[in-house]
Every structure is written in C-alpha cells, then in structure tokens.
Amino acid sequence: MSTGGNPSDPAPALNAAQAPARHFALSGPRRPIDPATNAVRPDLADIRLAEYVFAPHYAAPMTMIATAPAPLRSGPGEDAPMIASLTQGDRFEALEISRGYVWGKASGPNLVGYVAQSSLTLAGDAG
C-alpha cells in the first residue's frame, strides 16, 4: 500500500503481527491501597493512582477551598459518620460532585471523604 508520497497521508495501520511487542512484568501482589488516605472507590479513582489500581473511571482532582468549618464524612449525607473537620481555608481535592456532596481528599487531615458542596468553593473563586 502506497501513501502516494504525500506527507499529510496517514501511515498505514499495523496489524497485530506487525505491531511491536510489548512486555509486561507481573511482580506479584502489591500492598493494598488504603481508601481512607487514597481516593479510590470501586467505581472511581484519582488519576494519580492509575498506575496502582484499576477503576472503571479516573478523575483529575479539582482544588476547592472550605468557605467555613465543615465536617468530612465517611459518606454523603448528614447521617454519615464524621471522620474529620475542615476549617475555613482548608484545601480539598474534589473528584466527584453529586447530590450536594463532594467526594475527594482533604489535604489537611490527609483523609478521603465527603463534604457538603455548600461548604466549598473553587480555589480560583476563594479570593
């Protein structure tokens, strides 16, 4: 198959037999990732953990700032146990916003949990 010498023509696709071989090393079990301090759930994980965990979806953290003291909870909702407290100005790395709650990692206590969306603002809007 010829590309006709036109540099803008795409190169022909390689079939499986022509593709360069890739090698993957399986080095055995890894130490488990602690979901209390690493933002990983069965359905979603922080993109920075992609090398260590498999998730159907990855998200890049979006920095938010606590606008007032707020509880960091183990789940969304007022009835979920409080695991820490954010103070005004604390940074929060948001990975998901759903139904009035933000899931992510609180930088101060270095813990993963949920914070009421109303208690946070985007980092650029905090000034």
Image: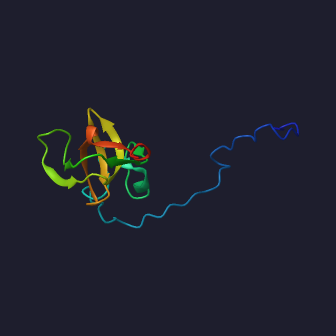
Along the horizontal axis of the image, is 122 left or right of 106? right
Task: Pinpoint residue 38: horizontal percent, then vertical percent.
Answer: 31, 57
Along the horizontal axis of the image, is 23 left or right of 112? right
- Depth check, front residue: 16 or 30: 30
Q: Is residue 126 above or below residue 108?
A: above
Task: Pinpoint residue 14: horizontal percent, then vertical percent.
Answer: 68, 44
Q: Residue furthest top?
A: 99
Q: Residue drawn 26% across and 42% down? A: 119
Q: Is residue 2 above or below residue 46?
A: above
Q: Residue drawn 27% across and 60% down? A: 34
Task: Pinpoint residue 25: horizontal percent, then vertical percent.
Answer: 47, 64
Along the horizontal axis of the image, is 38 left or right of 22? left
Q: Residue drawn 80% across and 37% down? A: 9
- Depth check, front residue: 91 or 24: 91
Q: Residue furthest front?
A: 127
- Depth check, front residue: 50 or 26: 50
Q: Which colour assignment does the render follow?
A: rainbow
Q: Is residue 39 above or below residue 121?
A: below
Quarter of the N terminus within the rendering: top right
Q: Is residue 31 above or below residue 92?
A: below
Q: Residue drawn 44% across and 57% down? A: 51
* Location of residue 49 by image quarter: bottom left
